[in-house]
Image (spheres, rainbow, N blue to C red):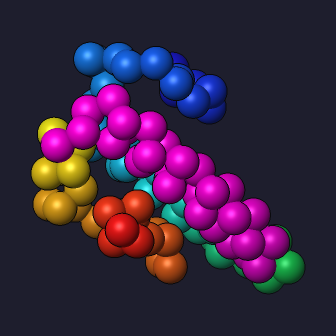
Amino acid sequence: MVSYVIIINSNNNHCYILLILIYIIRFYWSIGTQVFLCNPICILLYTFASWSFFANRIPYEESLLLKFYKHQYDDYMKQTIIGIPFIGSNRRKQ
């Protein structure tokens, strides 16, 4: 089961790859369902709502992961992309 609660304590069992895959799938799934249903107003609304959520959530979670895992997470970030348009990484802002 996936939780929407952000854990602010270090957890050695955290799986980075799973986290970003879940976010990418949820973002495109929420928009894709509305495309499938041919619902143009909700396509725009879901796109905005999903993007707004992840634009705030991903940088915050990355800052916590950098705090907990330091160089290990920084190395991981250098090898991966966010996968959601116009959402940058904390590493790229520094």
Residue drawn at the location 42% of the way across and 47% of the way down = 62
Residue drawn at the location 14% of the way across and 51% of the way down = 75
Q: Is residue 63 visible?
A: yes
Magenta stretch encompasses residue 58: yes
- On screen, residue 72 versus residue 83, left or right, reads left
Quarter of the image for residue 70 reads: top left
Q: Position of residue 81 (x, y in %)?
A: 29, 66
Magenta stretch encompasses residue 78: no
Q: Position of residue 28 (x, y in %)?
A: 52, 64
- On screen, residue 34 versus residue 62, left or right, reads right
Quarter of the image for residue 47 reads: bottom right
The magenta stretch spans which residues? 43-71
- On screen, residue 19 versus residue 35, left or right, reads left
Q: Is residue 1 above or below residue 38?
A: above
80, 28: nearer the viewer: 80
36, 3: nearer the viewer: 3
- Most extreme residue toward the right is 41
